[in-house]
Image: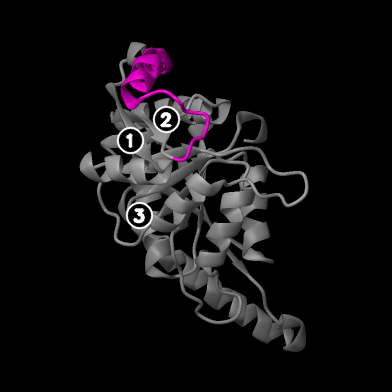
C-alpha cells in the first residue's frame, strides 16, 4: 500500500448515496488495509434543551452512525465512526486535512433527514471546489470493483498529476488504465486537422503513460477530436465499461476559491460512474 492511500474519509448522512459511498470505499479499503474514518457532522439546538436530553440525542445519533458504517464493515474494511458538531462542509474537509487523508469519499446525491443531517448534494459541490485531498463522488447503487480506470489527460501539470495518482489506484486494484485525450472542437488555437493533431499528440501521450506501463500497469490510450472534453471523457467511459473516471483540477482561485473548471463541473453533474477529482500536488 502506498502511503498516499493510507486513510479514507467518508461522509455519511443515512442516505442511499452515502451507503453506496461507504460500500465503494469499503471495497477499496478492505483489500489494502486502508482505514476509513466515517464522518457525520451535525448542527443542533442542544443549548436550548436539558443536558440529559442533549446526551440522549447525541447517543441516538451515534447509534445511527454505527448502523450507517455497516456497508463498509460488510466488505471487511476497518472503520472508525466520527461524530462532530459543525457545518458538514467544514467538518469533512477539516478532518481530511487533519488526518492527511488519501481520499475523501462522498455520495453523489443525498437527502436531508432533518436539521443537522448531511445534505450531500451541497456538500459535494463545496468539496469539489475546496478539498485539498483527492475527492471521490459516488453515484447510488455502485456495487462493482474497480477493474478499468479512465483518466483525462491534456498535458497540463494538473492532468499529469492525476495520471500519476491513478498509478496507486491501479496497483491497489490490479486495474487497467485508459488515458483519454480530447481535442476540443471550440479550441481556437487548434488550426491543424484532426489527423495532424493526432500525429503531433500521440508521441506525447505515449511518453506520459510509459512510466505507468513500466510499473506493470496495463495501459492504453484513446484520442478523440472535435468534441467537448467532458463529452469525450464520458463517452469513452461508457464505451469502455469504465469503473471510475479521474480528472485533475486546477489550483484554488485567489478571490473565489473556485477550483473546478467547466470540464470537471460538467462531468461532475453528468457522471454515471464514480468520479475522482485530483487537486494539484501542492494542495493535496
Q: Earlier in the sequence, mark 3 or mark 1?
A: 3
What residue would you read off at disc 3? 23
Quadrant, the C terminus? top right
Q: Is residue 13 magenta?
A: no
Q: Dominant secondary structure of the magenta stretch?
A: helix
Name the quadrant containing residue 203. top left
User: How far apart in space, not on screen, are marks 2 and 3 (Cα)?
Assistant: 20 Å
Give the residue drawn at x 44%, y 65%: 109
User: How far apart in space, not on screen, are marks 3 and 1 (Cα)?
Assistant: 18 Å
Q: Earlier in the sequence, mark 2 or mark 3?
A: 3
In terms of secondary structure, where does tag 1 sit?
strand
Contact between marks 1 and 2 (CB within 8 A): the answer is yes
Contact between marks 3 and 1 (CB within 8 A): the answer is no
Give the residue drawn at x 38%, y 21%: 197
Give the residue drawn at x 39%, y 64%: 17
Q: Residues within 10 Å of mark 1 (few under 14, many from 20)?
A: many
In percent of width and height, residue 82 lies at 57, 58
Give the residues in magenta: 186-212
Picture disc at residue 149:
1
What residue would you read off at disc 2? 166
In terms of secondary structure, where does tag 2 sit?
helix
Is residue 109 or residue 152 the one in the foreground? Answer: 152
Amino acid at each position: 500500500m502506498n502511503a498516499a492511500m493510507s486513510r479514507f474519509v467518508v461522509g455519511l448522512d443515512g442516505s442511499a448515496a452515502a451507503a453506496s459511498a461507504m460500500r465503494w470505499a469499503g471495497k477499496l479499503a478492505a483489500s489494502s488495509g486502508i482505514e476509513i474514518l466515517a464522518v457525520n457532522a451535525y448542527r443542533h439546538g442542544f443549548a436550548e434543551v436539558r443536558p440529559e436530553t442533549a446526551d440522549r440525542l447525541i447517543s441516538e445519533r451515534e447509534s445511527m452512525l454505527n448502523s450507517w458504517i455497516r456497508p463498509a464493515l460488510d466488505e471487511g474494511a476497518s472503520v472508525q465512526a466520527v461524530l462532530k458538531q459543525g457545518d458538514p462542509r467544514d467538518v469533512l474537509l477539516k478532518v481530511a486535512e487533519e488526518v492527511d487523508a488519501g481520499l475523501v469519499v462522498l455520495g453523489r446525491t443525498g437527502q436531508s433527514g432533518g436539521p443537522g443531517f448531511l445534505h450531500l448534494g451541497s456538500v459535494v459541490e463545496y468539496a469539489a471546489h475546496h478539498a485539498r485531498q483527492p475527492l471521490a463522488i459516488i453515484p447510488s447503487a455502485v456495487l462493482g470493483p474497480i477493474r478499468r480506470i479512465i483518466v483525462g489527460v491534456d498535458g497540463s501539470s494538473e492532468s499529469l498529476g492525476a495520471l500519476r495518482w491513478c498509478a496507486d489506484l491501479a496497483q491497489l486494484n490490479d486495474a487497467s488504465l485508459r488515458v483519454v485525450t480530447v481535442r476540443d472542437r471550440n479550441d481556437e488555437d487548434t488550426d491543424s486537422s484532426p489527423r495532424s493533431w493526432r500525429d503531433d499528440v500521440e508521441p506525447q501521450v505515449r511518453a506520459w503513460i510509459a512510466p505507468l506501463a513500466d510499473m506493470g500497469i496495463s495501459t492504453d490510450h484513446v484520442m478523440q477530436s472535435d468534441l467537448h472534453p467532458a463529452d469525450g471523457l464520458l463517452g469513452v467511459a461508457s464505451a469502455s465499461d469504465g469503473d471510475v473516471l479521474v480528472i485533475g483540477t486546477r489550483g484554488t482561485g485567489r478571490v473565489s476559491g473556485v477550483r473546478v473548471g467547466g470540464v470537471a463541473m460538467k462531468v461532475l453533474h453528468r457522471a454515471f460512474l464514480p468520479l475522482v477529482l485530483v487537486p494539484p500536488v501542492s494542495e493535496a
